[in-house]
Image (cartoon, helix red, strand yellow):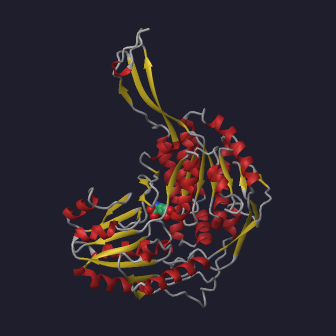
């Protein structure tokens, strides 16, 4: 199937060969090697991006530093006004950008649109936040003293985003960073450079109109060969927000930690849904299927495991298998498709290797797991989503496979279900389906889910931007997006002011000269 998106590419300003470095409105011709971007839906070459070199990066850092000195002095609500306009501009480009996300990354168009909507939503959130960068005041123990804390801008925030959310993750970080008075250098995944170029073309209109200095929003499109450790070790970046695998995240945490920088790590998940006998099974079914096959199983919040009560296990399994057999798999931009391709052939190989491992360890494949070929599947990136009956302790189950591979596990009492649920190294998202308050409250209590996100009668993926997003254990502990996640993008300062004629010391210490 051929779907032409040349009109959208033109609207977004994507050329055949694009520069990979931008400091806001100025694009820089770079000397790095080009990266060609192919659509996993039809294997067609979309366009290419010339990568930044380490020298280009250093230049960008200089521009960003100068920009920070100006940007931090602009009042936060005025910074919010720029973000408000970015939100309006994104609304104008929602459809073409959603299409490019879908075509370059492979998620279905509905999810592409949803991703741009997340960008718009975080802009709205950040505008409000720009007037709410609240500190606290506290009563001093000393007479005629006042204490408070306040939040100051941090500096340059490095944002590394993964291929699966080519635009939204940047927005969660960048829009909050902007209202916080920070400047941003974005290093996107090399699998989806074009999406990043398109985003920068869109925001350039707003930056130009508002005379935002060059260096406030920067793009450095460089793979790890062009620019690897230097980015994380760079003392010029007080904060690095990294989204990606646990394996690379551990290295990032180490490199940033060695220089005592701050990091927000948003790493792998191994998200599970507990389905109790008191669940609405139709609702649970939709949630599980969307969670497991949405974005072809390539969300960090994708449902990887379902822990189902013995009494409903066979019934639920039957319903799931039936649904899986009828899932429309195809081109991500075909409106009928519910399951698009995996991001590339390498992902297909990883998927197949995982399925082999499941079998080796004694798991039972119940449906799917094949690579598709023939008409409509020429790109070699299409697979049938798989369900396997397994035991939680299998090594493969303990690891995140970034593909539509769903594990079914049985339980007989809720304590056991929660124990199985928590018995993995990761701790991102989790859910329970039940209409029994005693069960759901237990799941949300201290002895319940150990994840950063815990839902009731909602699946594991598709979190709203208003909450803090992130997870515990090997998920890295970072929080992005809503709630008070903004605090990580600022430095806190405690201030004590003496308006008496004396100098009383805290803790009642006498020190007379
Ligand atoms: C990710 O996969 O890195 O909750 C982010 C969700 C989306 C974000 C996922 N809002 O599924």
- Relative vertical location of residue 242 with respect to residue 433 in this rendering, above or below: above
Q: Which residue is rendered at x = 43% and y = 34% of the image? A: 135
Q: Quadrant of the N terminus?
A: bottom right
Residue 230 percent coordinates (x, y): 67, 53
Count of marks overlaid on the render: 0
Q: Which residue is rendered at x = 63% and y = 70% of the image? A: 104
Q: Nearer the viewer, residue 462 or 256?
A: 256
Q: Which residue is rendered at x = 55% and y = 81% of the image? A: 330
Instruction: Classify residue 162 by image quadrant.
Output: bottom right
Tell me if I can see residue 80 in this picture: no
Tell me if I can see residue 150 in this picture: yes
Q: Quadrant of the C terminus?
A: top left
- Relative vertical location of residue 329 with respect to residue 457 in this rendering, above or below: below
Residue 296 percent coordinates (x, y): 50, 75
Residue 55 percent coordinates (x, y): 76, 52
Residue 432 percent coordinates (x, y): 30, 67
Instruction: Classify residue 35 by image quadrant.
Output: bottom right
Q: Nearer the viewer, residue 403 or 199?
A: 403
Question: In this rendering, would 282 be left or right of 295?
Answer: left
Q: Which residue is rendered at x = 58% and y = 59% of the image? A: 161
- Relative vertical location of residue 409 with respect to residue 221 in this rendering, above or below: below
Q: Nearer the viewer, residue 398 or 365?
A: 398
């Amino acid at each position: 199937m051929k779907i032409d998106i040349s009109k959208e590419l033109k609207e977004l300003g994507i050329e055949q060969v694009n520069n990979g470095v931008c400091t806001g409105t100025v694009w820089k011709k770079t000397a790095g090697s080009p990266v060609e971007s192919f659509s996993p839906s039809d294997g067609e070459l979309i366009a290419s991006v010339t990568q930044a070199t380490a020298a280009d990066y250093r230049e960008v850092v200089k521009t960003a530093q100068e920009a920070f000195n100006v940007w931090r002095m602009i009042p936060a609500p005025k910074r919010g006004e720029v973000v408000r306009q970015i939100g309006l501009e994104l609304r104008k480009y929602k459809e073409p950008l959603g299409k490019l996300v879908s075509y370059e990354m492979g998620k279905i168009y509905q999810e592409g649109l949803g991703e741009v909507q997340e960008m718009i939503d975080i802009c709205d959130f950040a505008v409000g936040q720009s007037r709410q960068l609240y500190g606290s005041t506290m009563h001093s123990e000393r007479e005629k003293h006042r204490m408070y804390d306040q939040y100051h801008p941090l500096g340059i925030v490095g944002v590394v985003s993964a291929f699966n959310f080519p635009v939204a993750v940047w927005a969660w970080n960048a829009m909050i960073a902007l209202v916080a008075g920070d400047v941003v250098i974005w290093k996107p995944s090399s699998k989806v450079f074009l999406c990043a170029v398109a985003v920068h073309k869109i925001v350039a209109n707003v930056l130009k109109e508002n005379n935002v200095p060059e260096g406030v929003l920067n793009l450095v499109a460089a793979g790890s060969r062009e620019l690897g450790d230097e980015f994380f070790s760079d003392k010029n970046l007080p904060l690095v927000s990294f989204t990606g695998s646990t394996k690379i995240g551990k290295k990032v945490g180490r490199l940033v930690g060695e220089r005592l920088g701050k990091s927000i790590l948003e790493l792998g998940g191994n998200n599970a849904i507990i389905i109790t006998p008191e669940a609405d099974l139709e609702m649970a079914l939709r949630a599980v299927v969307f969670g497991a096959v949405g974005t072809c199983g390539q969300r960090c919040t994708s449902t990887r495991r379902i822990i189902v009560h013995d009494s409903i296990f066979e019934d639920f399994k039957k319903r799931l298998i039936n649904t899986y057999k009828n899932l429309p798999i195809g081109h991500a931009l075909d409106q009928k498709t519910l399951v698009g391709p995996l991001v590339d052939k390498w992902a297909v190989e990883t998927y197949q290797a995982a399925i082999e491992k499941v079998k080796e360890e004694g798991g039972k494949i119940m449906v799917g797991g094949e690579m598709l070929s023939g008409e409509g599947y020429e790109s070699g990136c299409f697979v049938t989503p798989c369900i396997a009956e397994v035991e939680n302790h299998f090594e493969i189950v303990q690891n995140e496979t970034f593909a539509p591979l769903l594990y079914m596990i049985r339980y007989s009492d809720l304590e056991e279900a929660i124990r199985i649920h928590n018995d993995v190294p990761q701790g991102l998202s989790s859910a329970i389906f039940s209409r029994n308050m005693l069960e759901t409250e237990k799941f949300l209590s201290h002895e319940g889910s150990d994840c950063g996100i815990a839902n009731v009668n909602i699946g594991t993926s598709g979190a709203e931007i208003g909450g803090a997003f992130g997870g515990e254990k090997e998920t890295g502990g970072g929080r992005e997006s809503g709630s008070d996640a903004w605090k990580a993008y600022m430095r806190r300062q405690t201030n004590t002011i003496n308006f008496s004629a004396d100098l009383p010391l805290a803790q009642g210490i006498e020190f007379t000269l």
